[in-house]
Image (cartoon, grey):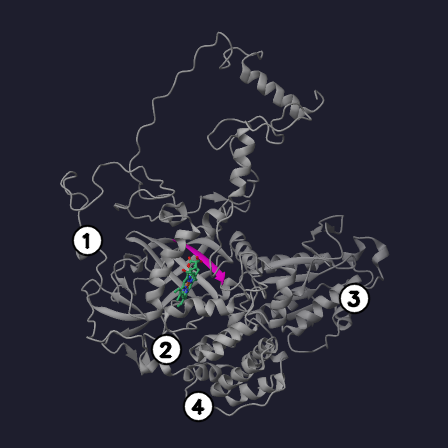
């Protein structure tokens, strides 16, 4: 055993601890001075305001701030210890009676290590279990200060935030690119307390009353007998519910549109869904709907891309968010509000503002920007932050209040309740990620996981022992005062207002607002999802809801299912389309877009270097794809390979370039091995490259190639001169045109929709 360095070091450490080692003064050594004991620990103050909630201010290798130092690979600190701070000399061997003997029960370290491990998991969220989070900052524009007294909306006021994006139906380990609604929950650590805006990327909800939430979720989750399918709505129980419950039609249509398969969390809108009530300094109230508008525009994957991604990179959205922040391409959203007068009817242009299945088209009430969100730091520890963050629609600050939307009422109850079992007790707001930055002076005491050491003897009000402290604030000292709205005299009933019966006019508005290619995607989505259902009656009911949205939609889906198309059972509403609902059109910044560059041993690397540099300077990400890893061109100035033909798949890239091949006698070639002189590009014959290119072409992605790369594109079956296929003499000119195409997200001209 002397030959084993770990054991030798451990034996030395044990000797030292026993006090019979060579050094003097080792505690425990006979004759050594007894150690001086520190004073007993002072009782601590009650939980202080949390000044250190922001992500640790550290830097990456590139000098950018991040959640964790990139070099940190293990725990900091010199010695491994138990949870109570006792230093350990071994964590690889249980304590045994001899090397081959039985393990001893007295091995505390063994028991502590295993016990803690056994309890590492907590229940996943009952919905929105799969998510990714990031830290950031919200800066108010001051434009909302006339409608809300909330300090965070003040001009240039900076508020730290934590945002968690999520899918709804899948488990914690499910794929990111499932067709689903996305959560977009923001915790604002304001100076007046925490405000949580718990939003989705779809502005309407499946149900109008929260009492039905368990029903819609039970229907959407995997079947209870075999627990399949995972993270899917393409199954009988989901469609059974949404076709029996036609108020779900609007949300379902959004899910079946491209909104259900976002390209990135960075390219999604967010919606508060409910109408909220803002209160200004004079006490005047306004009704509003909250919108997050991404600076990069709203973009989606194609359905085939989403399916391939689910297999080749289930963490696609999580990785995308993390990488973008790490590389300094900080995602940004503007927070905006649609503003409506707070009238007793609570309607706007005939739209019921308390009905969460309805939108107010932006053309009727423009979204007015009130602040800017920037996500600029990744979490340091996923569990501590992203998993333990606890949002609640009831976390409000003065100036932001709720309305009587019955869906919101159930949420106000549910979000605390669920944390009790998820986070194991009532003290979840003491977990670091949940701690407010405002001073806390509550009278909540004890309970599991109590971290505060509260002083004083009078945690009740009124009291005289503490001189009556703490005192009450008033509206003038930033108290949250519920808005004293009139509640109409009424009977107790289990009923909804008549306006909630209109389930089809707004789905029709959405359908009519789509461009032909978006409509075609919707047709394909319904045809796929209903095609995965087994029950004939469910498909027939679904076709009836589609007929009530639009006969063309119904006919196309019916055709795909091989079923007759029914006639509408309600009069079709006469709607004015809302162009703001469409994702096609507009030009957006290409920040953070991924560009693959296919290269091999025959490639002119000078051009690759220039193109890479130009892509980086434009804030995009160049990834060189080569036959094998390592470097291209060992001599001179080698180019690092980021992806190999084996690891690259089209779904990762927003555009793909095929780097040029130098002609015989070119300088670039002369600098390398002459054996490549007349070699054809390896890429032209490698099936993985041909798949990469043909998929990218099929998915409407910009493609480019220069100086002989046409042979590779042709080998992939890509017609020369097809829309969005750019070829030329040099990488620089090709890249310029490809970047311009990226601003539109996809080469829409490549598709010929039939709707
Ligand atoms: Fe919810 C989580 C968004 C209706 C009950 N919800 C949750 C999350 C988001 C939303 C983004 C994830 C939060 C996180 O990242 O931790 N939920 C919405 C929106 C809704 C909505 C936009 C409709 C407008 N939710 C809704 C209803 C109920 C719930 C009607 C219950 C009656 N939601 C929950 C929950 C969750 C949750 C069970 C699960 C985990 C959690 O709260 O913390 O309480």
Q: Which circle's residue, 1 or 2, is located before the other in the chain?
A: 2
Please check the rendered image and state whether residue 360 is part of the magenta-colored stretch, yes or no. no
| Picture quarter with the C terminus | bottom right
* Gap between marks 2 and 4 measured at Cα: 19 Å
Mark 4 or mark 2, which is nearer the start of the sequence? 2
Up-down relation of residue 122 to residue 699 (above or below) = above
Element carrying mark 3: helix
> Which residue bears the numbered disc 4?
572
How many marks the image carries: the answer is 4
Camera-side mark, 2 or 4? 4
Crowding at label 3, few (<14), some or many (≥20) Cα neighbours within 10 Å? some
Residue 501 percent across, percent down from the top left: 37, 82
Q: Nearer the viewer, mark 3 or mark 4?
A: 4
Q: Nearer the viewer, mark 2 or mark 3?
A: 2
Give me the C-alpha separation between circle 1 and circle 3: 72 Å
The residue indicated by pointer 2 is 360
Q: Look at the picture and state if 477 lies above or below 200.
A: above
* Residue at disc 4, secondary structure: loop
Q: Residues within 10 Å of mark 2 (few under 14, many from 20)?
A: many
Q: Residue at x 58, y 16 (%)?
A: 15
Q: Nearer the viewer, residue 394 or 685?
A: 394
Asked if marks 2 and 3 touch (Cβ < 8 Å), the reply is: no
Examine the image and state in which quarter residue 575 appears.
bottom left
Q: Which residue is mark 1?
A: 477
Span shown in magenta: 161-167
Neighbourhood count class around disc 1 (C-alpha, 10 Å): few under 14, some 14–19, many 20 upward: few
Q: Which mark is residue 684?
A: 3
Q: Is residue 172 above or below residue 14?
A: below
Image quadrant in which you'd find residue 19: top right
Q: Going from the N terminus, do you reach mark 2 or mark 3 first?
A: 2
């Amino acid at each position: 055993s002397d030959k084993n360095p770990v054991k030798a070091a451990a034996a030395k450490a044990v000797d030292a601890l026993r006090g019979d080692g060579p050094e003097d003064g080792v505690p425990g050594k006979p004759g050594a001075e007894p150690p001086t004991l520190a004073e007993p620990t002072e009782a601590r103050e009650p939980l202080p305001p949390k000044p250190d909630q922001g992500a640790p201010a550290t830097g990456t290798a590139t000098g950018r701030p991040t959640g964790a130092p990139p070099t940190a690979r293990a725990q900091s600190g010199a010695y491994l210890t138990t949870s109570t701070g006792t230093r350990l000399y071994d964590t690889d061997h249980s304590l045994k009676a001899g090397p081959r003997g039985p393990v001893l029960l007295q091995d505390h370290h063994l028991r502590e290590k295993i016990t803690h491990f056994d309890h590492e998991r907590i229940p996943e969220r009952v919905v929105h279990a799969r998510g990714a989070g990031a830290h950031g900052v919200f800066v108010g524009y001051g434009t909302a200060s006339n409608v809300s007294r909330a300090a965070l909306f003040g001009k240039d006021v900076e508020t730290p935030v934590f945002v968690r994006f999520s899918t709804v139906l899948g488990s914690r380990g499910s794929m990111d690119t499932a067709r689903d609604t996305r959560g977009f929950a923001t915790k604002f650590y304001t100076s007046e307390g925490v405000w949580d805006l718990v939003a989705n990327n779809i502005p309407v909800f499946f149900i109008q009353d929260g009492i039905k939430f368990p029903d819609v979720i039970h229907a959407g989750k995997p079947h209870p007998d075999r627990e399949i399918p995972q993270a899917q709505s393409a199954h009988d129980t989901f469609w059974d519910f949404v076709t029996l419950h036609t108020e779900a039609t609007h949300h379902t249509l959004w899910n079946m549109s491209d909104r259900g398969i976002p390209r990135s969390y960075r390219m999604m809108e967010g919606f508060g869904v409910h109408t909220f009530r803002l209160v200004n300094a004079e006490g005047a109230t306004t009704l509003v709907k909250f919108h997050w508008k991404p600076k990069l525009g709203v973009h989606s994957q194609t359905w085939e891309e989403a399916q391939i991604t689910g297999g080749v990179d289930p963490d696609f959205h999580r990785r995308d968010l993390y990488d973008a922040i790490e590389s300094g391409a900080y995602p940004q959203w503007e927070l905006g509000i649609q503003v409506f007068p707070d009238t007793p009817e609570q309607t706007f242009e005939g739209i019921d503002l308390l009905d969460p299945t309805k939108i107010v088209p932006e053309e009727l009430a423009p979204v007015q920007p009130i602040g800017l969100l920037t996500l600029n730091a990744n979490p340091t520890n996923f569990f501590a932050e992203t998993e333990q963050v606890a949002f609640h629609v009831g976390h409000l600050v003065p100036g932001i209040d709720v309305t009587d939307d019955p869906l919101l009422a159930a949420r106000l109850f549910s979000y605390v309740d669920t944390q009790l079992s998820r986070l194991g007790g009532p003290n979840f707001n003491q977990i670091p990620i949940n701690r407010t930055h405002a001073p806390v002076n509550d009278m909540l005491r004890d309970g599991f996981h109590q971290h505060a050491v509260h002083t004083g003897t009078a945690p009740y009000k009124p009291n005289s022992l503490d001189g009556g402290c703490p005192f009450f604030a008033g509206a003038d000292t930033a108290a949250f005062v519920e808005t004293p709205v009139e509640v109409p005299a009424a009977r107790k009933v289990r009923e909804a207002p008549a306006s909630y019966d209109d389930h089809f006019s707004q789905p029709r508005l959405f359908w009519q607002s789509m461009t032909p290619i978006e409509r075609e995607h919707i047709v394909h989505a319904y045809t796929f999802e209903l095609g995965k259902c087994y029950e004939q009656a469910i498909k027939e009911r679904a076709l009836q809801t589609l007929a009530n949205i639009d006969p063309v939609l119904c006919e196309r889906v019916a055709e795909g299912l091989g079923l007759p198309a029914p006639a509408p059972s309600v009069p079709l509403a006469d709607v004015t389309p809302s162009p703001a609902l469409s994702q096609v059109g507009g030009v957006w910044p290409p920040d953070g877009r991924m560009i693959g560059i296919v290269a091999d041993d025959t490639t002119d690397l000078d051009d690759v270097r220039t193109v890479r540099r130009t892509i980086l300077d434009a804030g995009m990400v160049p990834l060189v794809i080569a036959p094998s890893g390592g470097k291209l061109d060992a001599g001179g100035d080698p180019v690092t390979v980021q992806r190999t033909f084996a690891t690259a798949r089209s779904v990762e890239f927003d555009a793909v370039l095929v780097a040029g091949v130098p002609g015989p006698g070119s300088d670039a070639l002369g600098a390398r091995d002459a054996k490549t002189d007349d070699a054809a590009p390896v890429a032209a014959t490698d099936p993985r490259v041909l798949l990469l290119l043909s998929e990218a072409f099929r998915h409407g992605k910009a493609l480019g190639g220069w100086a002989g790369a046409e042979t590779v594109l042709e080998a992939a079956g890509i017609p020369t001169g097809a829309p969005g296929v750019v070829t030329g003499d040099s990488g620089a000119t090709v890249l310029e045109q490809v970047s311009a195409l990226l601003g539109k997200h996809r080469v829409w001209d490549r598709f010929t929709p039939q709707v």
